[in-house]
Every structure is written in structure tokens, then in C-alpha cells.
Amino acid sequence: MTQKPLSVLSQAVSGRVIVELRAGREFRGVLDGFDVHMNLVLKDATEIIDGETIRRSETTIVRGDNVIYISP
Amino acid sequence: MTQKPLSVLSQAVSGRVIVELRAGREFRGVLDGFDVHMNLVLKDATEIIDGETIRRSETTIVRGDNVIYISP
Amino acid sequence: MTQKPLSVLSQAVSGRVIVELRAGREFRGVLDGFDVHMNLVLKDATEIIDGETIRRSETTIVRGDNVIYISP
Amino acid sequence: MTQKPLSVLSQAVSGRVIVELRAGREFRGVLDGFDVHMNLVLKDATEIIDGETIRRSETTIVRGDNVIYISP
Amino acid sequence: MTQKPLSVLSQAVSGRVIVELRAGREFRGVLDGFDVHMNLVLKDATEIIDGETIRRSETTIVRGDNVIYISP
Amino acid sequence: MTQKPLSVLSQAVSGRVIVELRAGREFRGVLDGFDVHMNLVLKDATEIIDGETIRRSETTIVRGDNVIYISP
Amino acid sequence: MTQKPLSVLSQAVSGRVIVELRAGREFRGVLDGFDVHMNLVLKDATEIIDGETIRRSETTIVRGDNVIYISP
């Protein structure tokens, strides 16, 4: 049975995810929500650029058009 | 319960936010409003490029398609 | 109370604004009008690229998708 | 009174305009028409790249999404 | 009287055109058709990159979002 | 008989695919699902950048606008 | 009589095509299908980057927004 990307994303809510963004930026944190544009809400996320930790934030709202992939 | 990105953004209004834009630009200020495109209104915001403070403005209207993430 | 970006832009009409565009281009002039795409009409605007004044024009119509931010 | 960008563009028809495009390209000519995407028709336009005149054409149809600004 | 870009393009069908694309690519050939996205059909077109002739094709279908300008 | 791209993609579900993304990124894994934007769900996928294996993930949700091609 | 780009593409199905993509990538193969976004299905296609053959695949689904031109 084929799985829809947004259904799989829905199952990932409340769990830890890796979010790869354009320009070498990555977030690792808990997926707290999303919408159809793949805008994301992340909790307790660490921001990593080119492998280096930059910042840790309680809440991060990521604009979907920067996302390359999300890995639960 | 899953959180919608724009609802979380709504809860951030009147509080301080970090807004990361493309090309190494960042704003730090008070979120005064937004719309569905993630166009933002910032109050008393400091503009930082590659870590260096560039400008401080009473009001800044940011076009949403430059936004990478917003952190309340 | 939350402020919509286009309402704030509306209040800025007839006043001086800084318009930051992509690729290091900036306009400083009087905001004479705009539409929902953030296409702008500027009056008596100075164009500045990488900090250097390039041109001064009575009327300038800026296409909205180049805009990073507008500061009244 | 606020001016809509496309109305101002409409008033510029039949007059000379400077059209600044992305990637350092500029046209100078007579605006012969346009549509809502800011696709443009230019008459007797000179194409200039990085300050150097490249070509002169009787008619040029510019695709709007390359436009940064138009100055009548 | 103002001219619509797609009307001017319509008048150019069956005649020779220069089509300038992004990234220094140019086609010279006969315009055989187009649609509202400025997707183009070219006949007997020569492809030129950075001033050098690359290829000559009987039929070429150009995707419109690569177009900078078309000159009949 | 002509084949629709999304029909061909549908037939590829449950089989191994190569997914080429922009900026030299490639995934090799099992296609578990997709939607009309070519957002993809991959299972047991290996991520390869410029020919080098970076990461292996049980589940990966790829945002469609990064896709160049998919090869079943 | 003017030819619509998608009609010309339709006539090219089952024949060999050259597909030029952004970033110096080219496919040569048999066009097996397409849709209105210019998403393509190619059969027995060779992938060429900067003139060098990279890969040969039985089936390739190309996402349309990477296409510069298609030449039957």
C-alpha cells in the first residue's frame, strides 16, 4: 500500500526528526506540527550548519520551501 | 496534539523573535504581526548580517519568501 | 493586537521608506503605492548597491518578488 | 492617495523607460505594453549588460519574472 | 494604444526571433508557436552559449520560465 | 500509448529507486509513496552527496521541488 | 498555423529526444510520456553532465521545472 508523504509526516509528530534544509543547514529536534506547505514546528531543536552546532531553541517555525527532506 | 505553524506564530506575537533569512541575514525584534505568506511585521528590530549588526529600525516589514525560520 | 503586514505598509504610504532588495540593492524614497504582491511605487528614490549611490529616479516601480524588507 | 504599481506602469506606456533585470541586464526604450505579470513590450530598446551596450532591437518582449524595477 | 506581450508574440509567429535564456543561452530560429507560460516552439533554431554555436535543431520546445526576452 | 509521469511513479512504488536532487544530492532506496508535488517517501534510503555516502535512514520524506529525476 | 508547445511534445512521444536540464545536465532517450508541467518519462535514456556520460537507465521520470528545452 502506498504512503502519502504528509501522512508519514503526521505519524512522525511528537518524535525526534532530522530536518535537512538548503544551504547546508540542519535541525534536529522534536516535530511538534506541520501544515501542507511542509512548514514545520520543532521543539528543543539544535541548528547545525556544515556540521557545526549553531543554536538551540525551545521553539522553531521552519518555512517549508527551505526543506530538502525530513527523516523521523 | 499537533500544532499548526501559523498558530504557533500567532502565539509568538508581542514577544521577541529571532528571524533567520536567506543569505546570512537575521532580525531580532518584537513580532508585531504576520500573514499566511509569513510576511512579518517586526518592531524595534536589529538587522544582523553574518553576525554583524547593520541597522536598527522601529518598524520592519519582511517579505515571507525570504524567511528560513522564526524562533520565538 | 496583531498587525497585518499590508496594513502596516498601507500606513507607510506618503512617507519615506528603506526598501532592501536581493543582491545588495537598496532604495530610499517616498512610498507612493503598492499592491498585494508587494510591488511598490517609489517617488524620488535613490538606488544604492553595496552602499554606493547608483541612480536617482522620480518614479520607480519595483517588482515585489525582489523585496527582502521595507522599513518605514 | 495611494497609486497602484500597474496603474503607474499604465501611465508610462508610450514613454521612455529604464528596465532593470536580474544578472546586471538593463533595457532602455519605449514601453509599448505590459500585462499583469509585468511581461513587457519595449520598442527601440537598447540592451545593456554591466554598463556595456549589447544590442538594439525594434521590438523586445521581456518576461516579467526577470524584472527588478521599471523607471519611467 | 497599449500592446499586450502575448499579442506581440502572436504577431511574431512564423518569423525569425532571438530568444535569450538564463545562464547565457540564446536561440535564433523561427517561432512556430507558444502558450501563455511563454513555452515556445522554435524551428531550425541555432543554440548559442556565451556567443558560441552549440547545436542546430529542426524543432525545439523551450520551457517558458527560462526565457529572459524574445526579440522578433 | 503515452505514459503519464505520475502513473509511472505509481508503478515504481515498493521497488528500489534512484532519486537525484539538486546540489549533487542523491538517495537510493525503496519508494514507499508520493503525492502530486512529487514529495516522496523513501524506505531504507542511503543519502549520497557528490558520490559519497552520508547517511542511511529508515524513513525519509523528500520535498518534491528538490527532485531532478527519479529512476526506478 | 501556430503550434502549441504541448502538442508538439505530444507528437514527439515514442521518438528520440534530447532533454536539456539546468546545471549542465542532459538526457538522450525515447520520450515515453509527459504531463502539463513538462514532467517527462524517458525510456533507455543516457544522462550526460558537462558532456560526459554518467548513467543509462531503463526508465527516468524528470521533474518538469528542471527542463530548459526538449528537442525531438
Image (cartoon, coloured by chain):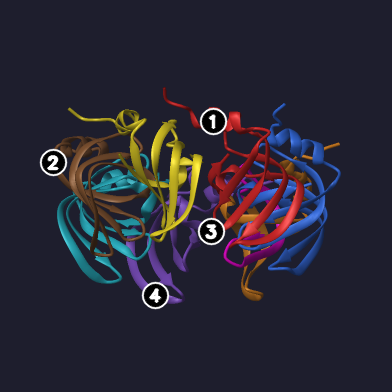
Chain colours: A blue, B orange, C purple, D cyan, E brown, F red, G yellow
Q: Residues within 10 Å of mark 4 (few under 14, many from 20)?
A: few
Which residue: 71% across, 62% down?
B29
**In terms of secondary structure, what is the magenta stretch mainly?**
strand
Q: Secondary structure at mark 1?
A: helix
Residue under label 4, please give it. Answer: C53
**Mark in front: 4 vs 2:** 2
Residue under label 3, please give it. Answer: C68
Q: Secondary structure at mark 3?
A: strand
Residue under label 1, please give it. Answer: F8
Q: Contact, CB < 8 Å: mark 4 with mark 1? A: no
Q: Is residue C67 magenta?
A: no
Q: Contact, CB < 8 Å: mark 4 with mark 3? A: no
Distance from disc 4 to disc 1, alpha carbons, whole Å, reads 54 Å
Q: Which residues are magenta?
A: B20-39
**Mark in front: 4 vs 3:** 3
Chain letter of disc 4 in the image:
C
- Are labels 4 and 1 on one chain? no
**Mark in front: 1 vs 2:** 1
Q: Secondary structure at mark 4?
A: strand
Which mark sits nearer the N-terminus, 4 or 3?
Answer: 4
Q: Is residue B24 magenta?
A: yes
In the picture, measured across the screen, residue C69 lies left or right of residue F33, that is: left
